[in-house]
Amino acid sequence: MKIANFSTLFSILFIVPVTFAQLRVGFYNNSCPTAETIVQTIVRNLVTDEFESDPTITAALLRMHFHDCFVGGCDGSILLNSTDSERFVGPNLSVRGFELIDEIKTELEAQCPSNVSCADIMALATRDSVSLAGGPNYNIPTGRRDGLTTNANGVFDLIGPTASVAAFLSFFGERMLNTFDAVALLGAHTVGVGSCDLFEDRLTNFNGTGLPDPSMDSNLVANLTSICAASENPSTGLDRSTPLTFDNAFFGQIRASRGVLQLDQRLATDEATSSVVAQYAADNDLFKRQFAIAMVKMGAVGVLTGENGDIRTNCWAFNDKFWVVCDVFDLLF
Ligand code: HEM
Ligand SMILES: *[C@@H]1O[C@H](CO)[C@@H](O)[C@H](O)[C@H]1NC(C)=O
Ligand SMILES: *[C@@H]1O[C@H](CO)[C@@H](O)[C@H](O)[C@H]1NC(C)=O
Ligand SMILES: *[C@@H]1O[C@H](CO)[C@@H](O)[C@H](O)[C@H]1NC(C)=O
Ligand SMILES: *[C@@H]1O[C@H](CO)[C@@H](O)[C@H](O)[C@H]1NC(C)=O
Ligand SMILES: *[C@@H]1O[C@H](CO)[C@@H](O)[C@H](O)[C@H]1NC(C)=O
Ligand SMILES: *[C@@H]1O[C@H](CO)[C@@H](O)[C@H](O)[C@H]1NC(C)=O
């Protein structure tokens, strides 16, 4: 324990309010200049590994980052693996993403201990994986801090794949994401898979009619029916043309009645979103630009910055409370 010195008091009184709630591009320029390169290298090695390449990591990270941001803000709390954490409630997220974040964190702790947050690692790794899959490459402001709480029940506030477009737009609107952002973000379904149990009713008994969903192309009904019958826990690409490539093909697919999830399909026909879908389908660069803008906005939802939250040393566990208590004593005495 030590007496609070002038610089501590100065930072309490002045620096904290001035820098409050600011994410900045290059936040780690001084404190950890190699941070972004380290993240990028580890993500690239996984995607391009000659023997164990995992291109599906883009989908895993995108979904994880989205869920983190929409449940209690982008604070890395989805990474916590205590049994009562967000991670184990509701939709199960892929383990692959968690392992990659842990690997990056281990390297960053070796290079710049206690400086780079798990929330930032997730945002950066997601950005890099999108770019490697053919998507946009964009600057992402950093300076997020990790959350000190987890809200497992918040997971149930996420809307599901049968939601209406109106519910979808208001869910995103509540987080300051407009229609252009929301539609671009759902375009993340250009990569990754969905489990059959989330859309099987569309194949056989849509809305209690005993018939397939009339808004689904009949060839797709046949295709998905045979895929879903073929294995235990089957899943299949949400973008029927290029499920490993980050491009605008998803929008062309939903315009051709080939959306797998009901909400995805509805975007193409609902009057609130159909013209935006048409624009993204016609212009890949426009989609990619707007996706980048929307990801930066989504990555700022409910963030902790400045002196809020902390920097976890393990992404899967809160820091030891003992040290938090000591920090408080440092300030008091
Ligand atoms: C409220 C809007 C959304 C709904 C209802 C929704 C729904 C779903 C559903 C039902 C799945 C399949 C999950 C499974 O089979 O377990 C899925 C997968 C996925 N979602 Fe979304 N999603 C939404 C928004 C987003 C956003 C904003 C992103 C990212 C920016 C995203 C990225 C993904 C990705 C990449 C996958 C594939 C995951 C994988 O292959 O591992 N979703 N989504
Ligand atoms: C970090 O460096 C980059 C590139 O020189 C610059 O664009 C950015 O503004 C810097 N950020 C900060 C917070 O210093
Ligand atoms: C959490 O993850 C870490 C790292 O993978 C592991 O060592 C630990 O046993 C896990 N804890 C729980 C409760 O699952
Ligand atoms: C999946 O979620 C259930 C609760 O819905 C949980 O019991 C189970 O441990 C989770 N599995 C994994 C691998 O996270
Ligand atoms: C960040 O790195 C600096 C220099 O290595 C170190 O003094 C500091 O304790 C680290 N942690 C934080 C939160 O700044
Ligand atoms: C589902 O059925 C109900 C009542 O039969 C009807 O009011 C509703 O519009 C139907 N929904 C769709 C999406 O077809
Ligand atoms: C389903 O369609 C995809 C292309 O969209 C094709 O690669 C696959 O072989 C089809 N599967 C079945 C079982 O028809």
Image (cartoon, rainbow, N blue to C red):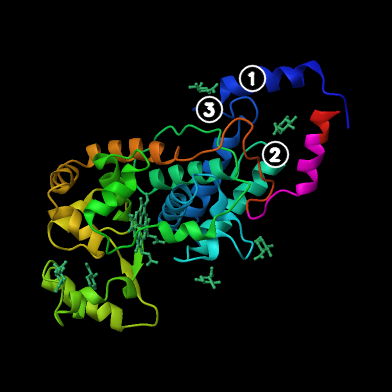
For residue 114, the mark is 2
Q: Is residue 132 above or below residue 290?
A: below
Amino acid carrying label 1: it is: Ile
Query: Residue 300 in the image: x percent, y percent?
Result: 45, 37
Q: Is residue 269 above or below residue 33?
A: below
Amino acid carrying label 2: it is: Ser
Q: Residue at x 58, y 58 (%)?
A: 99
**Residue marked by disc 3:** 26
Q: Please state which of residues 39 and 90 is positioned toward the viewer in this rendering.
A: 90
Query: Residue 157 in the image: x percent, y percent?
Result: 41, 57
Q: Which residues are magenta?
A: 316-328
Amino acid carrying label 3: it is: Gly
Q: Residue at x 45, y 34 (%)?
A: 140
Query: Residue 47 in the image: x percent, y percent?
Result: 46, 53
Is residue 288 found inside the magenta-colored segment of the image? Answer: no
Distance between the alpha carbons at the discs numbered 1 and 3:
19 Å
Pointer 1 local density, CA inside 10 Å: few below 14, some 14–19, many at least 20: some
Mark 3, ligand 2, within 8 Å: the answer is yes
Q: Of the residues under marks 1 and 2, which one precedes in the sequence?
A: 1
Q: Quadrant of the N terminus?
A: top right
Q: Please state which of residues 20 and 97 is positioned toward the viewer in this rendering.
A: 20
Judged from the image, the secondary structure of the residue bearing numbered disc 1 is: helix
Q: Quadrant of residue 146?
A: top right
Q: Are marks 3 and 2 in contact (CB under 8 Å)?
A: no
* Main SS, magenta residues: helix
